[in-house]
Image: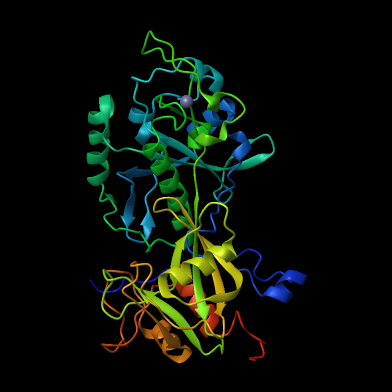
């Protein structure tokens, strides 16, 4: 497959604003999948009067997913549809009663498609105004055929595909423009989390999607059964076990003690000559800096000293936050040893010039051919939509270490 065009990255709204922090640490870096244009108005997710108005407003749009794949006009355009299109699945108004009444009337035998209120888009004309807030409401809806709505979903899907719309077949959808990519990322993250958590993690009972798709509640009763539900700690003081999870991951560009090389690794399933920065999950009771040092040592044997966070990236596969860091190896800790953790097939030090050239001619998505100008046998690296690319670019092209005097 030839390489797809790599979209622009979101612009940090604070990038050009002078401040003491930007003078000391440089511009804020915004990574792909961040930079949502929406005001999430999280405090309105339990307001059924607002949600009712948001559902039916003329400016409202829905983005649709089937098996977590978004509906697209083309690989660079997310499709949106109005309420009238999704009414057969959503119904007249799922927000008709206050949330407390919905929880009290819970019936686990009734399938309800997952509907997420993502926020208010401030850009379109003639927006919804509610109290002091204004914007065009944006929802995400899971239209995957299920239960008694299978026929309605299939009819909807047939109607959409006959209009030259299609559900993505790509793995990561890295071709959307940055604002659409951010909407897609938040919707996919939340739909996946709702789908994976039909039961309460504490008591095992079926749960109800609440807070406009941002929480799952373990109701105290279930009209589908005569027997009472078990008691559950999530109904008391500890209710946060049912909020969406985000799993922190560290990903790091490690520079040598002398500052002229970068440590990269590769997995055996990757294309030939493809390398990336090392990465791994943050473990419980571990700081970001400690996780960077541990992961690098486990996977490569290299011992890292000082660690600095560079930027972060939401990564909705399924629920990661990539915490990008730059670390520097200790002078006597640069020996590579792959004997501990079998995750990497190889890890080695690359000259900055070789990484700089690979960023220029050797980046593409996994599964794609390298771009024009790439010479077979040269180093290949992830596309600029990946935070790994941004970390390497920050180091080898000077931005992150500008003004640093080498020891
Ligand atoms: Zn429970």
Q: Quadrant of residue 154?
A: top left
Front-most of residues 272 and 30? 272
Name the quarter where the N terminus is drawn. Answer: bottom left
Label total for image: 0
Horizontal arrangement in the rendering, residue 146 relative to residue 281 (left or right): left
> Relative to 174, does residue 277 appear above or below in the rendering?
below
Residue 127 in the image: above or below residue 37: above
Q: Nearer the viewer, residue 354 or 149?
A: 354
The picture places residue 142, in percent across and down from the top left corner, at 36, 38
Residue 21: x %, y % from top left = 73, 70
Relative side of 133 to 355, left or right: right
The answer to whether one can see residue 19 in this image is: no
Residue 399 is left or right of residue 110, and the answer is: right
User: Quick one: which residue is furthest to the top in this view?
Assistant: 226
Residue occupying the point 53% across, 34% down: 54
Residue at position x 71%, y 72% in the image: 22
Instruction: Give how far across and how far down residue 258 sits, in percent.
Output: 56, 90
* Nearer to the camera, 77 or 245: 245
Quarter where residue 192 is shown: top left
């Amino acid at each position: 497959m030839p390489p797809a065009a790599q979209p622009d990255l979101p612009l940090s709204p604070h990038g050009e604003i002078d401040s003491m922090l930007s003078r000391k640490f440089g511009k804020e870096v915004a990574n792909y999948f961040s930079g949502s244009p929406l005001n999430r108005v999280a405090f309105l997710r339990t307001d059924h009067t607002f949600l009712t108005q948001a559902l039916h407003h003329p400016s409202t749009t829905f983005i649709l997913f089937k098996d977590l794949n978004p509906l697209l006009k083309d690989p660079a355009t997310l499709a949106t549809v109005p309420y009238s299109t999704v009414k057969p699945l959503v119904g007249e108004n799922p927000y008709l009663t206050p949330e407390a009444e919905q929880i009290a009337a819970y019936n686990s035998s009734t399938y309800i498609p997952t509907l997420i209120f993502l926020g208010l888009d401030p850009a379109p004309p003639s927006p919804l105004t509610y109290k002091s807030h204004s914007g065009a409401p944006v929802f995400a809806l899971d239209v995957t055929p299920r239960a008694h709505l299978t026929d309605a979903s299939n009819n909807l899907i047939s109607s959409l595909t006959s209009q030259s719309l299609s559900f993505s077949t790509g793995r990561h959808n890295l071709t959307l423009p940055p604002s659409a990519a951010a909407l897609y990322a938040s919707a996919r993250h939340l739909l996946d989390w709702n789908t994976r958590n039909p039961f309460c993690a504490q008591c095992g009972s079926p749960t109800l999607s609440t807070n406009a798709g941002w929480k799952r509640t373990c109701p105290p009763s279930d009209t589908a059964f005569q027997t009472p539900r078990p008691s559950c700690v999530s109904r008391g003081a500890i209710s946060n076990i049912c909020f969406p999870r985000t799993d922190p991951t560290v990903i790091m560009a490690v520079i040598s003690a002398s500052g002229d090389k970068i440590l990269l690794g590769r997995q055996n399933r990757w294309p030939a000559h493809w390398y990336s920065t090392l990465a791994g999950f943050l473990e419980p009771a571990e700081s970001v800096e400690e996780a960077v040092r541990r992961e690098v040592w486990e996977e490569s044997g290299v011992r890292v000293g000082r660690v600095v966070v560079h930027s972060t990236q939401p990564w909705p596969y399924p629920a990661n936050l990539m915490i990008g860091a730059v670390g520097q190896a200790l002078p006597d800790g640069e020996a590579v040893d792959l004997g501990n953790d079998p995750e990497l097939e190889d890890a080695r030090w690359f000259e900055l010039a070789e990484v700089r050239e690979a960023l220029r001619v050797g980046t593409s998505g996994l599964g794609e051919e390298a771009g024009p100008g790439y010479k077979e046998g040269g180093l290949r690296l992830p596309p600029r939509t990946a935070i790994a690319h941004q970390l390497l670019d920050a180091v080898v092209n000077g931005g992150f270490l500008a003004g640093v005097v080498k020891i």
